[in-house]
Every structure is written in C-alpha cells, then in structure tokens.
Amino acid sequence: MNKKRSDNFDKFSQKKKGSAVKEAYRQEKKKIKAESRAAGEAARQRKLDKQRGIQEEPTVKKGAYKKTAPSYGTATTSLSSRKTSSTNKRTPASMDRADAKRTAGIGKVTAHAEASFEQMPLNKYIAHSGVSGRREAAESVKSGQVTVNGDVILEPGYKVQAKDVVRFKGKALSIQVTPVYVLLNKPKDYLCTASDPQGRKTVLDIIKNATTQRMFPVGRLDRNTTGVLILTNDGDLAQKLTHPSYEIKKIYEVTLDKVVTKADLETIASGIELEDGFIAADAVSYVGAAKNVVGIEIHSGRNRIVRRIFEHLGYDVRHLDRVMFANLTKKNVDRGKWRFLSEKEVRLLKFLNKSFTRKASK
C-alpha cells in the first residue's frame, strides 16, 4: 500500500508543471523556426551559387559535396579549404582572386572589417555601417529598402556573410571600423536627420569636418529644440541609448509663455494621460526665481513628449533646451559647437552606469 502511494506521489511530483510545458513548447517552436530559416538560407545560397557558376562535385565520402568556385584567371579554392583558412583567421592577403572579386562590390571594406565577422544579423550590419540604429535598421529592412546580393530581404535577422553585398536604397554599405562619438550642443533650426529633401540645415552639417565616417544622431531633438545631442556611427550604442528598456535619463529646461502653477507641477509629477498613453515625469521643479522656467527629468523617448505634456495643460513652450542626456551635459560646449567624447565617457555610456541609468521600479 505504501509503495503504491509512493508511486502515485512520484508520478505527481515528476510531472512537468505548466511553465515547464510552455517552455518546452517554446523551445520546440524556436527549433522548428531555426531549422526552417536554415533550410531557406541554404536554398537561397544554392540559387546564388548556381547564378555565379559554382558547381557541386561529390567528394570521396558518400553524400558529402564540395563547391568549386568559377575561375577568374587563377586557380580556384574549394569551399572546404576556405573554411579551414577562415578558422585560422586568414587575412585578405591570403584570399584568392575569386573571393576578392566577389567582395569588390561591398565598398570600402578594410581588412579589419572583412575579418571581424563571419555572420551578422542584417539589421546589426546596417547599424554598424553607420546608417542608423538597429531599430531603425529593422524597419528599413521590413519596408523593403535593403538588398543583399541584389535580392530584397525582409527579415532583419537574416545572416549576412562577409562576402555579401548589402545595399540600402541602392547604395552599397560597409562596416565602419573606427567608432566615433561626438557631443553637440544643438542650435535651433537644425534637423536631426542625415539629409533633408528640402535642403534644410541638418546637425551633420555642423560636424562635417569631425570625421569622414558616416554618422547619425542618437536621441533626436526636434528642429526648435536645443541642447545635448550625441552623434555616432556605433549602432550598438545607439540601440542602448534609445531603447525604452534602458530608460535613459534626460533633463530639459523649459521656458513657457506664463507662470506654471504648483498644482500643474504636481500633476506632471503624478502623471497625465496623453493620446498615446500615460506619462509621468521622474522629477519636475522651478528653475530659480522665474516661475515660467521649469526643469523636468524624464526617461521616455516618445516623440515631442515634453512639449506635449505642457501643451496638454494649456501652456505654450517658448524654448526647450536639453541640458543632460544619460550622463552627458553641454558644459564647456557653446551653442552650435561640438567635441569628441572621452574614452571614460564612452565607457560609461556603453556599460550604462547606474549613476545615470534610471533604476527599474521594484
């Protein structure tokens, strides 16, 4: 009798709980999806190999195949030998002419860039090329603006090979090998875009002599907002500084058309409901004796959020200046001027030091 009870208890105790069953189901779905993606990539690679004239030949081992690249006036190298040399961290000097010709269309890819990766998600590749951050890059891929070896790719996670030719809006991209970080004290009437169809001034016009690398702004400000702005070609850092989950602190000085009541300050601190959802400031107070100048600390990155908060309460924002972004201020940087970030500043940004990262609510 006791043995029977023990058996029944063991069956109950060893039975997978709901969370375990769900996790197993998720893992199974993930495995199936990965296999499907791998099969799709393999089919696409076979199609590209066929277009390039690469033929498959049976090896000594039954069922195994090797690929032979077409000749460009020199001896070709088998796929198996290329894998071996890649494992040994070969340099472009050891590449055969067939490899060199296939990589010629990538653009200004340096030896470091060529050897720095074997596979990379497409949106990450675009971010490293200096076009935009990863989230913006993913949207560009989904909207059909990106091609790989001439084919439109709609999956941001598609694995790019070092030899692939990636184009954004028809322009060949290459990985930036020298990260650059610039802090700009943005003036009014400048757009935070790489270019403007109407020919208006952009923040890139101000820093055009800073570097030859392709830069983009992080933590954008609207045309009439001034203050701290970061520009870089580091897509990974841009991802950290703009993704909502990191809750990066921003402080603004707001000049309004009239005195702000204490009751409205309390309302802003406790939170208000806007058309795109609830928002509450982390801190808000008067700046000095002037009751129409307010300092507000906020971590949201929603579009024009500070202006919309005050407009919702019936105020007209006369001037908006961002005085801090993450741990950076505009100290010793005049309006319209810029400077490179120090190594220490970059390190703090990358590791998201707790002193300037908003702590998660408990």
Image (cartoon, rainbow, N blue to C red):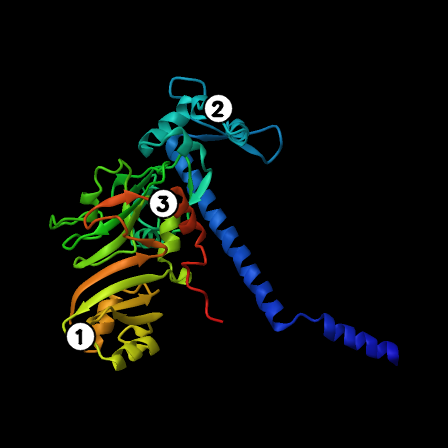
User: Residue 157, can we see it?
Assistant: no
Q: How many marks?
A: 3
In terms of secondary structure, where does tag 2 sit?
A: loop
Sequence-first disc among 3 and 1 = 3
Left or right: 297 as drawn, with respect to 224: right
- The tag on residue 77 is 2
Image quadrant assignment for residue 176: top left
Real-space Cα separation, disc 2 to disc 3, in angstroms:
35 Å
Q: Which residue is mark 1?
A: 315
Locate residue 237, reporting x and y percent: 38, 49
Image quadrant assignment for residue 172: top left
- The tag on residue 69 is none
What is the residue that sits farthest to the front in this orientation?
289
Locate residue 132, reporting x and y percent: 31, 49
Q: Nearer the viewer, residue 315 or 283?
A: 283
| Location of the N terminus (image quadrant) | bottom right
In terms of secondary structure, where does tag 3 sit?
A: loop
Q: Are marks 1 and 2 in contact (CB under 8 Å)?
A: no
Q: Are marks 2 and 3 in contact (CB under 8 Å)?
A: no
Real-space Cα separation, disc 1 to disc 2, in angstroms:
70 Å
Q: Nearer the viewer, residue 30 or 56?
A: 30
Real-space Cα separation, disc 3 to disc 1, in angstroms:
38 Å
- The tag on residue 234 is 3
Q: What amino acid is at disc 3? A: Asp
Discs 3/1, front: 1
Discs 2/3, front: 3
Sequence-first disc among 2 and 3 = 2
Left or right: 14 as drawn, with respect to 304: right
Locate residue 335, reporting x and y percent: 19, 51
Q: Residues within 10 Å of mark 2 (few under 14, many from 20)?
A: some
Q: Nearer the viewer, residue 349 or 22?
A: 349
Above or below 331: residue 29? below
